[in-house]
DNA sequence: ACGGTAACGGACGCCCTCGTCCGGTTGGCT
DNA sequence: AGCCAACCGGACGAGGGCGTCCGTTACCGT
């Protein structure tokens, strides 16, 4: 029974260690890190890494599953807020901070990858929810009338440009930027 | 007489062709392109390229001299405007568009390079002018009171995150973004 | 406890980039 | 015209990332 690579306990362990390493390294250094860097960080040979995840996309897809869920949570929380304007604001803040904390996920979400990350469908769903909340906030008169759902992605992409040596610096810059963007979008 | 590498006409020609190639390639693909790519584009051997410009920094410094001047011009034009608010606005628009049209210069200006590009001093001067115009616009009541000069750099850095396949798409996104940022900064 | 096999990882060959050397070419001066 | 130095660029060796092969290890079922 079971999928390949999971019949033995050490294989399962390695798989988890690789995912943990990938999460840490992707978050800190982005999607461009060499696969071997992740293998080293996980105390695993290159072959083992490639056996579990044949491509960087496959690895990123699995590694970012939880961040993807965090995205949903942030957007859904915004949607659940009875005040659409406040919901919209907290969504922007939440997404910007999440993206600032994880360079790799930010790059993946803003589709820097050639095409079709494994979670392209999930991303699409999140984008639809973002659009829904944006529309709702606009129709409640909380946003300028010419704001489009795509503007949120514009803001996220711009947020990705905020580089900085330390994660703390990135988060701080991102926070200030989110506030600026929100003021630029509100009515 | 003359500096080395300039005693012969073919050397001067090559130097110019290299600079043209560097401007084109840096603008299109950023600072990360291999030196050889520029050499190929200039129909020149690698050795010739390295003889004229021993490092990528040296090359970028010379190649971007005119963009640097364009930066000055944009900021000075803003400073010259009798309405500081309008001057500030046109500066943001101008800088964002310039940066969107030239990925390499945008990267160099936002100091992605380790340190001390050749024009670090020039950059510093531009930053001071930006700060001056920002302060002036704020004291004229055109900007929110909590806006700091550093916010303009924040906006420029964020603008650099706006990737896009075609230059046209980048410029379009950048324009929309500049408008958003301006609304976020104005009183 | 022991055999069989899933799984591991060191090592390999390929390709790309880097910066440099040196034999050949060519522009400029007489 | 002819020389000579300035200049060119193909070729080299080092360094690093890539994805894969295969001999070895160690988990699991009996």
Image (cartoon, coloured by chain):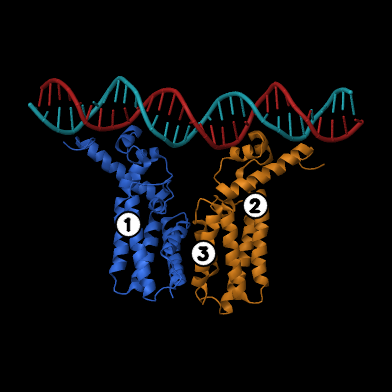
Chain colours: A orange, B blue, C cyan, D red
Label 2: state its secondary structure.
loop
Per the image, the residue denoted by label 1 is B125
Circle nearer the N terminus (2, 3): 2
Q: Nearer the viewer, residue B127 or B50?
A: B127
Q: Are marks 2 and 3 on the same chain?
A: yes
Q: Is residue B155 above or below residue D24?
A: below
Q: CA distance from mark 1 to mark 3?
A: 25 Å
Per the image, the residue denoted by label 2 is A64
The spot of residue A52 in percent (x, y) is: 69, 40
Q: Nearer the viewer, residue B69 or B122?
A: B122
Dot 2 and dot 1 residues touching (CB under 8 Å) = no
Name the residue rendered at 65%, 33% in the picture: A45
Q: In the rendered view of the protein, which quadrant contains the C terminus of chain B?
A: bottom left
The spot of residue D20 in percent (x, y) is: 63, 31
Q: Nearer the viewer, residue A30 or B124?
A: B124
Q: Is residue A95 above or below residue A132?
A: above
Name the residue rendered at 59%, 79% in the picture: A140
């Amino acid at each position: 029974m079971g999928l390949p690579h999971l019949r033995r306990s050490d294989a399962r362990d390695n798989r988890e260690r690789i995912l943990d390493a990938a999460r840490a390294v992707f978050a800190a250094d982005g999607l461009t890190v060499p696969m071997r860097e992740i293998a080293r960080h996980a105390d695993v040979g290159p072959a083992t890494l490639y056996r579990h995840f044949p491509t960087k996309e496959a690895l990123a897809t699995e590694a970012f599953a939880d961040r993807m869920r965090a995205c949903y949570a942030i957007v859904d929380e915004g949607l659940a807020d009875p005040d659409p304007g406040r919901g919209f604001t907290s969504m922007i803040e939440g997404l910007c901070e999440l993206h600032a904390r994880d360079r790799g996920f930010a790059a993946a979400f803003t589709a820097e990858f050639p095409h079709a990350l494994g979670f392209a469908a999930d991303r699409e769903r999140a984008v639809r929810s973002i659009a829904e909340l944006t529309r709702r906030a606009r129709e409640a008169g909380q946003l300028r009338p010419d704001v489009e759902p795509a503007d949120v992605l514009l803001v996220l992409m711009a947020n990705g440009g905020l580089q900085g040596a330390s994660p703390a610096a990135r988060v701080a810059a991102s926070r200030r930027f989110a506030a600026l963007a929100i003021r630029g979008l509100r009515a």
